Image: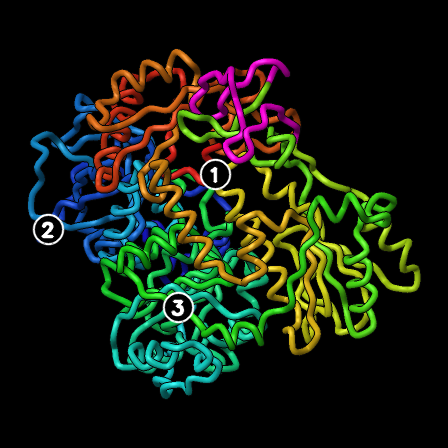
């Protein structure tokens, strides 16, 4: 209070009520906030006057900690883990009174308080503490550092994914007190799996079992995940469940509420909104709840005393982040299981090659049901190949075989029928004209293409192929892959005019449909759940899925088919699935036998022979041709590194979203694949990261993009 105000408050100097009103009006006025001070001349903290700060700069050559002085006024709030504002980029010449000044304001996190600094020059002072809430603990920091090193990225970029933006209202509200521990659950439907009850007992007793779980078809998998979480909570530890989308998260959320009651778990999805999601995240960090279910970003949730991590359907592309450094949920949760010595459960109706490798290496054990239980739970699978289509009059006139017509007709008598049609946009590639075996390169097994309709080139390594012949039948003639019929759903609607037709796809996804006769047309991954299960399902245009120009085409097709077929009633209830694809294909045979684990093991053996992921580690390097060539030449790659390519990189079509690694519209980029033998992945990531950091430090104008373990390599 100024001396003038003190004098005016004395008797006879004026009405004090008026002065108080003026002061209150000034306080409430919306005036611009003053910029954080440089604290020139302000005393420093008596103890640990240096704060080591991670600044929010994602460039690789600044991927390090910076020391700042801690003013005495900020001493109590400037604790490790809190958000701060600092001045960055002032240079060493702007020093006033022993303190560095100037530079732009930038966000950061305090990672450590120290008594002195390794830097011998003048330190800038912390500008302000944004919030005294510690949001970056030591375990989360160590995890983010491990992820950044594995994916050749910066720690600041990983923290952008791991720590949600601050919300003041959510932060101001206290979190509820934690509830008592729940009792160990009964095995329930886990008894259908040979080692299921033992897995739950190990979790309840404080153990850390690791398993790859091939779930039986049907609606029970959310309740089974809830049972594993309940067993972990009963031991006094926390659990984390990551699923690919909000619909799956809602199903697990409902199962956890039923198994544990309200208030014992948090739901972290984008649909929650920023305030609610941050409030839930804070409740997890503060220890109010020990269980979390969420989508991709929840893989970094700071669960206390983590005892179990669960990832469902790890083959879904949603588990791979679209932001640098592009971490995958499965790999991050593997790191958490190894660092925290907690349980690990990777589940799905299918089985990825990476999951099969975890079992083959002995890192995790298989969790399977016996064949008799599987036969009772799975629907009857029937196939329609090229030969039957050629002889079928109904298929020639309506592009749908008689077997499929009969399955639809019979299924509509008792319930809804699912029709899975591949999404648009699968690019045709080349295959044998006689047996439809995909045309592959003899050098690297990549897909062959003919961009100018004359010369054959490999889409991966770029080598020309002038004397191709089919490895299966010896034929030398090629054909383009057939995408399939686009109007099948419309024709089914006309064939059954009295039956309602519902669609589920990218623009509008249905969560569920009632147990009533209906035709449900869906793209892969958007299939709604039917109450009581579907009576039948049609999996159309199998060649469109199997013929995708990608190493994972067969694996992805089988995963999509299994996910749709798992929504169909079991064989004992009359459930039938018809897949329109060649019966001799490996993925089709695996679907008929319902053997995703066996398919994944065979794919893993093929990858090992060819030297492709996950047996090897691979990186994709993309950029303008001159910049890419210079980068690879100066990268200092491990001696055993092998470079495939470069080949022209895909570019974003005008008006379409640009995917990571795509060339900007109108520019010509190239892509090279760099692979190393097992055990050298860390050396590859370190070399690429060092080379890119040196390049950015020099201010190179031409961009070069790196992605470790790209999901699509051709």
What is the magenta range? 451-480
Question: Does residue 71 belong to the magenta stretch?
Answer: no
Q: Which residue sits at x=34%, y=53%?
A: 357
Q: Earlier in the sequence, mark 2 or mark 1?
A: 2
Q: CA distance from mark 3 to mark 2?
A: 30 Å
As drawn, 708 above or below 254: above
Q: Residue furthest top?
A: 626
Between 457 and 42, the residue placed more toward the observer is 457
Q: Which residue is mark 2?
A: 48
Q: Which residue sits at x=77%, y=72%?
A: 415
Secondary structure beneath label 3: helix
Give the left or right position of residue 53, taking residue 223 as reference: left
Residue 551, disc: 1
Splitting the image into 4 quarters, where does residue 289 fall? bottom left
As drawn, 297 above or below 151: below
Question: Does residue 476 belong to the magenta stretch?
Answer: yes
Q: Are marks 3 and 1 in contact (CB under 8 Å)?
A: no
Give the left or right position of residue 47, taking residue 67 as reference: left
As drawn, 408 above or below 127: below
Give the left or right position of residue 637, taking residue 650 as reference: left
Callout 1 crowding tier (Cα within 10 Å): few <14, some 14–19, many ≥20: some
Q: Which residue is mark 3?
A: 283
Q: CA distance from mark 3 to mark 1?
A: 42 Å
| Secondary structure, magenta segment, majority class | loop
Q: Position of residue 638 (x, y in %)?
A: 21, 28
Discs 3/1, front: 1
């Amino acid at each position: 209070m100024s001396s003038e105000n003190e004098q005016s408050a004395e008797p006879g100097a004026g009405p004090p009520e008026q002065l108080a009103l003026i002061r209150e009006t000034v306080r409430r006025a919306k005036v611009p906030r003053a910029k954080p001070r440089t604290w020139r001349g302000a005393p420093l903290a008596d103890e640990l006057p240096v704060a080591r700060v991670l600044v929010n700069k994602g460039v690789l050559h600044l991927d390090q900690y910076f020391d700042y002085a801690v003013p005495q006024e900020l001493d109590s709030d400037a604790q490790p883990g809190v958000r701060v504002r600092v001045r960055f980029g002032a240079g060493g010449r702007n020093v006033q009174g022993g303190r560095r000044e100037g530079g732009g304001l930038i966000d950061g996190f305090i990672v450590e308080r120290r008594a002195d600094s390794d830097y011998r020059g003048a330190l800038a002072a912390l500008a302000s503490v944004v919030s005294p809430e510690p949001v970056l603990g030591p375990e989360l920091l160590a995890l983010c550092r491990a992820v950044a090193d594995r994916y050749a990225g910066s720690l600041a970029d990983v923290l952008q994914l791991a720590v949600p933006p601050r919300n003041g209202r959510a932060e101001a509200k206290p979190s509820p007190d934690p509830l008592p521990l729940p009792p160990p659950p009964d095995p329930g439907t886990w008894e259908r799996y040979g080692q299921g009850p033992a897995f739950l007992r190990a979790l309840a007793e404080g153990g850390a079992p690791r398993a790859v779980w091939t779930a039986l078809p049907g609606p029970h998998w959310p309740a089974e995940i809830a049972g594993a979480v309940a067993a972990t909570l009963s031991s006094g530890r926390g659990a984390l469940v990551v699923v690919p989308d909000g619909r799956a998260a809602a199903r697990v959320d409902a199962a956890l509420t039923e198994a544990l009651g309200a208030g014992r778990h948090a739901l972290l999805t984008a649909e929650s909104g920023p305030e609610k999601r941050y409030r839930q995240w804070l409740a997890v960090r503060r220890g109010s709840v020990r269980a979390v279910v969420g989508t991709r970003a929840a893989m970094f949730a700071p669960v206390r005393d983590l005892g179990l991590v669960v990832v469902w359907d790890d083959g879904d592309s949603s588990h791979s982040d679209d932001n640098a450094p592009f971490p995958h949920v499965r790999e991050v949760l593997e790191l958490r299981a190894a660092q925290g010595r907690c349980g690990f459960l990777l589940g799905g109706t299918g089985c990825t090659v990476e999951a099969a490798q975890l079992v083959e290496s002995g890192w995790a054990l298989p969790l399977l049901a016996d064949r008799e239980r599987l036969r009772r739970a799975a629907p009857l699978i029937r196939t329609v190949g090229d030969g039957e289509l050629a002889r079928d009059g109904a298929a020639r006139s309506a592009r749908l075989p008689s077997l499929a017509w009969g399955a639809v007709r019979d299924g509509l008598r008792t319930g809804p029928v699912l029709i899975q049609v591949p999404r648009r946009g699968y690019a045709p590639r080349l295959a044998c004209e006689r047996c439809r075996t995909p045309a592959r390169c003899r050098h690297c097994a990549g897909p062959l293409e003919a961009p100018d309709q004359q010369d054959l080139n490999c889409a991966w390594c770029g080598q020309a192929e002038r004397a191709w012949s089919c490895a299966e039948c010896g034929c030398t003639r090629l054909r383009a892959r057939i995408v399939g019929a686009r109007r099948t759903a419309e024709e089914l609607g006309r064939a059954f005019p009295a039956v309602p037709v519902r669609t589920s796809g990218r623009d509008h996804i249905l969560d569920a449909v009632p147990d009533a006769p209906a035709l449900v047309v869906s793209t892969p991954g958007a299939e709604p759940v039917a109450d009581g299960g579907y009576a039948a399902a049609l999996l159309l245009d199998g060649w469109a899925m199997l013929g995708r120009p990608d190493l994972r085409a067969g694996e992805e097709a089988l995963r999509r088919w299994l996910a749709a077929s798992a929504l169909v009633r079991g064989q004992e209830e009359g459930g039938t699935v018809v897949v329109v694809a060649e019966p001799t294909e490996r993925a089709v045979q695996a679907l008929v036998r319902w053997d995703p684990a066996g398919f994944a093991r065979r794919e893993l053996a093929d990858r090992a022979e060819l030297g492709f992921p996950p047996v090897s580690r691979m990186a994709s390097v993309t950029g303008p041709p001159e910049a890419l060539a210079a980068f690879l030449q100066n990268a200092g790659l491990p001696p055993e590194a092998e470079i495939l390519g470069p080949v022209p990189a895909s570019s974003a079509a005008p008006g379409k979203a640009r995917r990571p690694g795509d060339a900007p519209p109108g520019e010509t980029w190239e892509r090279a694949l760099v692979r190393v033998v097992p055990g050298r992945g860390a050396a590859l990531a370190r070399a690429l990261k060092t080379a890119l950091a040196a390049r950015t430090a020099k201010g190179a104008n031409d961009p070069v993009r790196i992605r470790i373990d790209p999901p699509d390599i051709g």
